[in-house]
Amino acid sequence: IKSPEQAGFDNERNNNHYSKSKDMKKASDGSGDYQPPRLVNHSDEEEGHFVDLLHTSLDNSVNVEDDDGLMNDDSSHNKHLPKALTNSPCSIASTSGPAFPPFNEQVKERAGWLIGLLFLQSCSSFIIQYNQTFLQNHMVIVQFLTMLVGAGGNAGNQASVRVIRSLAVGTLNRHTMDQFLRQEAKMALCLSALIGTTGFIRAALFRTPPGETIAITTSVFAIVAVSVAIGSTLPLGMKKVGIDPANSSTSIQVIMDILGVLITVCVSSIVLSLPVFQTDESGG
């Protein structure tokens, strides 16, 4: 005497055996196509769904032909795969080329770029030499010069890295370009105000004269604003002309070294040439 569970299991096994025998008979007679059963773990629905997608996609990709009647290559088959299959971690990655460029090519590219930036950075020394008399009369500006130039380089590099990352992951494209530029414009003003306030506090704590304090605060505000603007657009410009945007992170440092010194000298000259500060200096 069999239990109801055992009887149900035997009936299911007999039905499967009958169906299999019937299919094999059709295949031998030529009246039907026999397809061997696929083993699927029904306890895991996701795995079974993935196996079904795999069989379906392979059947579809084998029959894909070009307009000329020729079979496509393996790369063209990928566009016919289901989205769930292409996004799966089990999808086959292309290994047609090396992972990294040859070492000699990397040295040539990187060294050439750095050497060019080295010569370009010499322009800041020319600016200092040209304004040597003014800086000698206002040595406080020289003491804050490294802080001003460093703030510009840091802000520009930060903006540049964010653009490079957005380009790499695909979040920055022609559809999101306007939104990104508007956001960076507001970010430039916000960061300039915050860092300018911080520079004012630092200058006041060191008992800097009022004229130099205003000159330093105004300079750092202008430097940070210009730095964020250039750092946000330089990678996009490099990509437009066919240059690797990754080089913008080093280029922005040198560019802001030159512009930082130039902005500091120009702003300080204008501020300290005002009559109110000249009267204070003559009175002191």
Image (cartoon, helix red, strand yellow):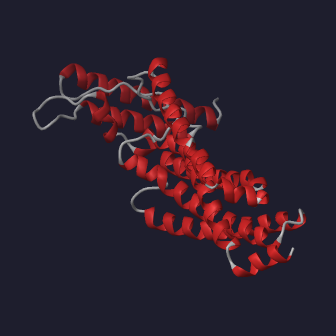
Q: Reply above or below: 225 against 15.
A: below
Is 79 on the left-hand or right-hand side of 30? Answer: right
View extreme (front): residue? 282
Looking at the picture, tell me which residue is in the foreground, 166 or 46. Answer: 166
Q: How many marks?
A: 0
For the N terminus, the image quarter is top right
Residue drawn at x 48%, y 24% is 106
Residue drawn at x 22%, y 31% is 72
Q: Reply above or below: 60 against 268.
A: above
Q: Reply above or below: 162 against 112.
A: below
Image position, residue 211 (x, y; %): 77, 72
Image position, residue 62 (x, y; %): 26, 30
Looking at the picture, tell me which residue is in the foreground, 56 or 226. Answer: 226
Q: Reply above or below: 135 against 4.
A: below
Looking at the picture, tell me which residue is in the foreground, 49 or 227. Answer: 227
Look at the image and tell me whether residue 38 can be seen.
yes
Image position, residue 204 (x, y; %): 86, 68
